[in-house]
Each structure stands twice: as structure tokens, then as C-alpha cells.
Amino acid sequence: MAFTIDVDENKWNKEILKILILDRTTNRNIIWGTEDYEYLGEAYNSHYPISIELITGNHSNIIKPRILKTRENQGNRTKNKAEVFTPSWICNKQNNLIDKLWFERDNVFNIEKNKSWESNSDKIKFPNNKNKTWKKYVDERRLEITCGEAPYLVSRYDAVTGASIDLFDRIGLLDRKMRIVYENTETEKEWLKWSERAFQSVYGFEFQGDSLLLARENLLASYCDYMKERLNREPTNKELIRIAKIISWNLWQMDGLTYTIPYKKAKEVIEQMSFFDLEGKEDIDEYEFCLIKDWRAKKIVVFRDLINGDKKNE
């Protein structure tokens, strides 16, 4: 595979790109959040927004996965931002621990073998428990903190070595949900419904805008991969927009120490909002604590309040 972000307009049109670079808290674009690109000009300042024209055309290859960055650049990001990417076999081991607790048994999706794994080719069996059905598993919410390129959610490639991973050997938390959807749905309508719910159930946040954009692109490309395998077709533009909107809400830009968008001071959010409260608002600086969606409750919530156990969001 080519390890460059798919910002070619032949892959994602401008409507999709506009969604992938949108910050839902500010209703503006995500910012660069890194000084790596400032040599390209003032528009690439770490505090400035990422715009479509800055990452397409002659600039379509400036954002690269970490494996393609220079060793010096990798080292600087590790030193300055504590950016450390985890090899897939470790992601798999840790994700397996989550599933061991949920399924109450080992080796559900694969068997670990040294620094690799062997996928279980049998249909996944669920516990004899009405609270542990395949639908409950798909709806279980999962969060990858400081997600980088989101290797714990989707594993299209090993973030450390760059090696591509076959579809049925992928080990991300979303990959596992998509396998369950694949195995337990019969019609296209059912597959579309539960695939969407799988995407609604996984979350991640990241400080640096380039990594966040890569993570969002990886999730959207994964949706295309799974649809191609299950339905033998590419998503329509309407379907891509629908999933891209979910991704742009669920993978968001945030300073994990302050729970705000990067470089912003915290301001209180007075009340919980519905999905529609932010529609058309231009000035939302008062909402600088990051917002996410609870898709099942159909509410916008403040992420910090979830961490602090705020009673307003129960």
C-alpha cells in the first residue's frame, strides 16, 4: 500500500475532505498542532487551521504516516510531544485483554505467537448471556487516548514497521466490531445499519492535527475496505459522508491535559446540548472544552464531564 494520506480528490472529494478536517467543538477546521510544517510558510503555523488547499494538489504528500517521516522528525516529535507509536502485536495483546474480560475467555479473535498472531477463522461465539450478544458487543464504547494514527482502532498497517495487514488479520477495536458485523448480518440494509453503529461506538483524541487527519482517513478507508469485502462495492458518496461525519465527531482534536482544543484556555459549558443546538453557530468560543456525541442517547456531551463523572451527563 502507499503510505501517504489519501487526499487525492480522485479518492476523497472536497465535500468529504471538508468533513475530515472539521473540528466539531469549534465548528472550524482542526489546527496543525505541530511546528513540523512551518517551513512551508505562515499558513502552516502550528496554531493555524488545516485547509483543503494546504493538503491537496502540489501539497498532497506533505502529511505522511510516522513511518515515512525522517528519523530526525520522528525523534523530535517523540521528544517534544511524547509521540510513541505502538507495534501492532502490542496493540493486539492489549486489545485481547479487553476482549478476554468481555467474553470471559482467551483467544477470542486470535492466538498470540511471539511478536505476531494467528487469526481465529471460526465464527466468533458469544457467551450464553443476554447481556453479551453480538449487538451488545458492537455497541460497546471504546476510546483510544492520544490516538495518533489510531492503531488500536484500525490496523490497516503496522504503525512502526509500515507493513500492511490483511483484512481478516486486523486487530483494531473497530476491526473486531466490523468482523462481528460481517459474521452476523445477512442483508445489505442490516450490514449498513450495524456498521454505522460500530463506527459510532469507537472514539479517540489527538493533539497533533496531521496525526488526527491520518487517523480519520484510516477509519474511513477501513469502511471502504470492509464494504468492498462484504457488499462487493464501493460506498456511495452519501454513505461516505454519513460515516465521515461520525468519524469527525468521534475522533477529535484535544489537549489531553486540559480537555480543551489545543492552545485554548478552558471556559465552562453551562448546559448540556442536543444534537441540533450547535447548528449554524459561528461564535462558539465559550465551548472550548471539547464536545463529543453520545449517539445512543442522541446528545452532545462535554468530554471533561465524562471523565469527572459529572452528574449532568448521566
Image (cartoon, helix red, strand yellow):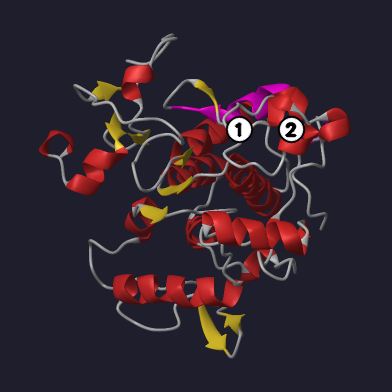
Query: Looking at the figure, which quarter contains the C terminus?
Result: top left
Residue displayed at 67% across by 22% down: 15
User: Does the magenta segment cover residue 15?
Assistant: yes
Disc number placed over residue 20 in the picture, else none = 1
Residue 268 visible? The answer is yes
Residue displayed at 39% across by 84% down: 106
Report if the CB atoms under discs 2 and 1 are less than 8 Å apart.
yes
Q: Does 292 appear above or below 87?
A: above
Magenta-highlighted residues: 10-24
Q: State left or right for residue 248 relative to residue 97.
A: right
Between 5 and 179, the one nearer to me in the picture: 5
Disc number placed over residue 12 in the picture, else none = 2
User: Does the magenta segment cover residue 84?
Assistant: no
Residue 23 appears at what percent x and percent y?
50, 28
Q: Quadrant of residue 286?
A: top left
Residue 116 appears at what percent x and percent y?
62, 83
Q: State left or right for residue 167 relative to residue 279.
A: right
